[in-house]
Amino acid sequence: MKRLPFILVLLAAALLVAPVVRADVKMQQKDSFKFGGTLGAVLNRVGGSTTNEGTTTSVAIKGDRKLQLGPSTGLIVDLGEQKTYLLDVKGKTYRVMTFAEMRAAWEKAKADAEQKKSQMKPEEKQQMEEPQKQYVFDADVKETGQHKSIAGYDAREVIVTVTAHEKDKKVEDSGGLIITSDLWLAPKIAAVDEVTAFNLKYVQAVYGPQFVTDVQQLGSTMAMYPSLQPMTAKLHAESAKLEGTVLMSTTTFDSIKSAEEMKDAQQPQQSSDTSTSSIGSSIAKRMMGSHAQPQQRSNVFTSTHEVLSVAPSASADDVAMPAGYKEKK
């Protein structure tokens, strides 16, 4: 594990506000993840359906067992057996991994990260920790008044925005990061909330109650955008205050260059050693490349999630191993 995926950080923050309910469910959902910038255009081309039209998966939960099935991969989680079944849909095979094996792999990843941290130079550690000390995180929640039908439910639109910027400065002046979550909420749907609740039980059964803290610490240790952890935590804390169940969300992650960096970027003779003091500039350079036209706001990625259908019931057959699959040792 050389890099902590943003989705894992997002999941950890979401688990902080996961509802505790109990309901069987069958659901179809669609997810996509698209990178921004010049490099992102290349990654999107090779990303397949996930970074283009999106990937549709089916989810079924019955008691302590869950089956999630997509076009190429699938997963069965059995909380009673304390096992996961990793499915290769195209090859019609599966392999079994116990919770204990998953926990051991996670502990090894943490140990490796700590070892790497111990080998870092003092100035590298300071650079990694500095953004969290210098930047503040503001949240804005806006009810737009818009409504639309999603999966047969009337949903209202709420936009939650979290901005990271230097204290006592506007983001346009200091540079920074902006995460925007466009949410469509229906009245409370226990069956949909059960999916999040089941994921919480699964994560806690495998990794224990310290998982959220471990993810945040591991992300910082591995020097992956330290400000993302407090930003996503604040995003989900604000979202948790909203009434209803999210049926559709679009999350965008943008970087903002500072006024000084914009001035430097517009100089034709500027070298590739241009200052990367702000978190906005650092991410923009990683994603946009050195030859991109200077823009103050650059999209790093956009992710979407939509519930296509939901039924508040499921049978044992809905969470059983699909027919024709063989175990791969």
Image (cartoon, grey):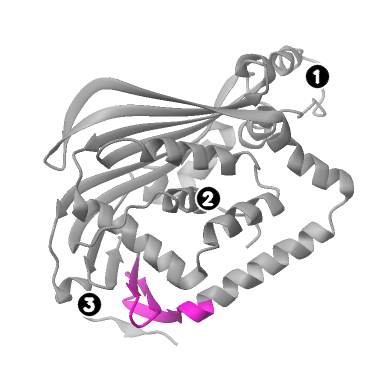
- The residue closer to the viewer here, 261 or 130, is 130
Residue 75 appears left or right of 119: left
Q: Which residue occupies 23% across, 81% down?
A: 324
The secondary structure type at the circle numbered 3 is: loop
Disc 1 marks a residue whose amino acid type is Gln
- Outermost residue, bottom side: 329
Which residue is denoted by mark 3 in the rendering?
A: 320
Tell me which label, 1 or 3, sits earlier in the chain. 1
Residue 84 within the magenta-colored segment of the rendering: yes
Q: Which residue occupies 50% across, 68% down?
A: 208
- Nearer mark to the viewer, of 1 and 2: 2
| Image: 54 above or below 319 | above
Q: Are marks 3 and 2 in contact (CB under 8 Å)?
A: no
Q: Are marks 1 and 3 in contact (CB under 8 Å)?
A: no
Tell me which label, 1 or 2, sits earlier in the chain. 2
Tell me which label, 3 or 2, sits earlier in the chain. 2
- The residue closer to the viewer here, 199 or 94, is 199
Residue 139 appears left or right of 172: left
Disc 2 marks a residue whose amino acid type is Val
Please indicate, yes or no, whether residue 302 appears anywhere in the rendered image.
no
| Image: 98 above or below 245 | below
- Where in the figure is residue 269, as x and y percent of width and height? 81, 16
Q: Which residue occupies 13% across, 72% down?
A: 315
The disc at residue 9 is: 2
